[in-house]
Amino acid sequence: MKILYGVVGEGMGHAMRSRVVLDHLTKRHDVQVVVSGRAYDYLKQRASEHLAVRKIWGYTIVYEDNEVQKWRTLGRNLKGAVKGWPENIRAYVEIADQFEPDVVISDFETWSTLFAQRHGLPVISVDNMQIINRCAHAPELLAGVEDEFRLTNAIVKAKVAGAFHYHITTFFYPPTRKERTTLHPPILRPEILAARPGPGDHLLVYQTSTSNPQLLDELHKSGRACRIYGLRRDLKEDVVDGNLRFRPFGEAGFIDDLRTAAGVVASAGFTLMGEAVFLGRPMLAVPVKQQFEQILNARYLEREGYGLAADELDGPTLGRFIEGLPTFERALAGYSQDGNTDLLRALDDSLARATARAS
């Protein structure tokens, strides 16, 4: 069949997970991807006889000092829309005339969903965000962020409305509250599936914000070896400062440091969190401020016993995390996942049912 596949371009997690699904789909189907932002460059490299990749304009979020900058985000998107919408219209016409898809898969992407609604095509949702809207969450997990939950819930609901089925990837399993909704383990790239957890004493620290000047002091005081990514982006080789090792980003090196880490210290982005859980690595998650999805991820991580959630990264919190590593490891030992088998099998079934009903 012909599949139009929409990938949201905000962040790289959606693109990396979509790569896995696309590799599976193109074995049997022709796929046209529409994607915005940096994710386009990543997926474009995978173009082939059965996979075309088209860039469109999409919404972006401005981050600074580990916090969403609302007004700068609004300004950037208003400016981007002036040039972006004409390109989106051209893509719409060309795909409708030349590709003529049978079904749409959306990874939290709006343009492809609107295309499907306009042409009467079934939409299948594959992402982690819909857990916010389509599952029930205990009051204690929403305590203090009820307003953020209501706002984010409305946005998530509108993003991919009226889908034929919602496949939600997750490492935690709240009860679903809506029909046509199933939960599946996180989508993992082949490099993570091939990695084998190994013994290690270091902390893997992934931080891009430099707004907390005490962070490095606290890491020094911990006495633990720390392999740090993100804080010094211009590095070409490792820089060592006592027990701190600043590293340039490289996928192979990062995965090796992850699989052997005693613990991970990072924000609460779903991709890294799912990889850490799969590899049995405890995590201290510090959500980006005003990012409700990350707040929820971190709180569920702590509830499952896989690590700690913290609003700020300070000395006492880091100390509690290090002290609790053996307890977190025991909880993670009970987690199991058969690669991507569950999600891909369920997606194939949804595609067959959706296209059969449409015909």
Image (tube, rainbow, N blue to C red):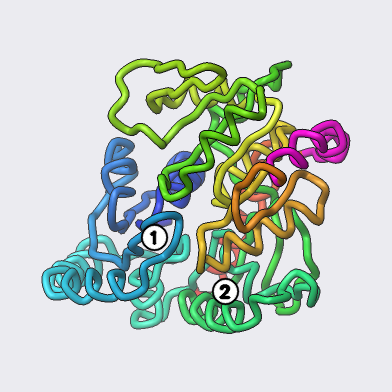
Residue drawn 23% across the image and 62% down it: 56
Residue 272: where, in percent of width, then height? 57, 42
Residue at 20 percent across and 69 percent down: it is 88
Query: Is residue 35 something one can see in this rendering?
Result: yes
Residue 226 location, x and y as percent?
57, 25
The range drawn in magenta is 317-336
Q: Nearer the viewer, residue 25 or 243?
A: 243
Callout 2 secondary element: loop
Tag 1, which secondary structure? loop
**What separation in Å lies between label 2 and label 1 (alpha carbons)?**
19 Å
The amino acid sitting under disc 1 is: Val
Q: Quadrant of the N terminus?
A: bottom left
Inspect the magenta stretch and tell me whether residue 327 lies in it. yes
Q: Image quadrant of residue 201?
A: top right
Secondary structure mostly taken by the magenta-highlighted segment of the chain? helix
Query: Which marked residue is nearer to the observer: mark 2 or mark 1?
Result: 1
- The number of discs equals 2
Which residue, given by chain and number where applicable, does mark 2 sit on? 164
As drawn, the label of residue 310 is none
Q: Is residue 154 above or below residue 282?
A: below
57 relative to 144 in the view: left or right: left
110 relative position to 81: left or right: right
| Residue 168 falls left or right of residue 330 | left
Say whether residue 22 is visible.
Answer: no
List x then y, in percent, for residue 335.
81, 40
Within 10 Å of disc 2 (Cα), the crowding (few <14, some 14-19, many 20+) is some
Q: Amino acid at mark 2?
A: Phe
Residue 168 lies, in percent from the top left, at: 63, 61
> Which residue is denoted by mark 1 in the rendering?
8
Q: Quadrant of residue 64?
A: bottom left
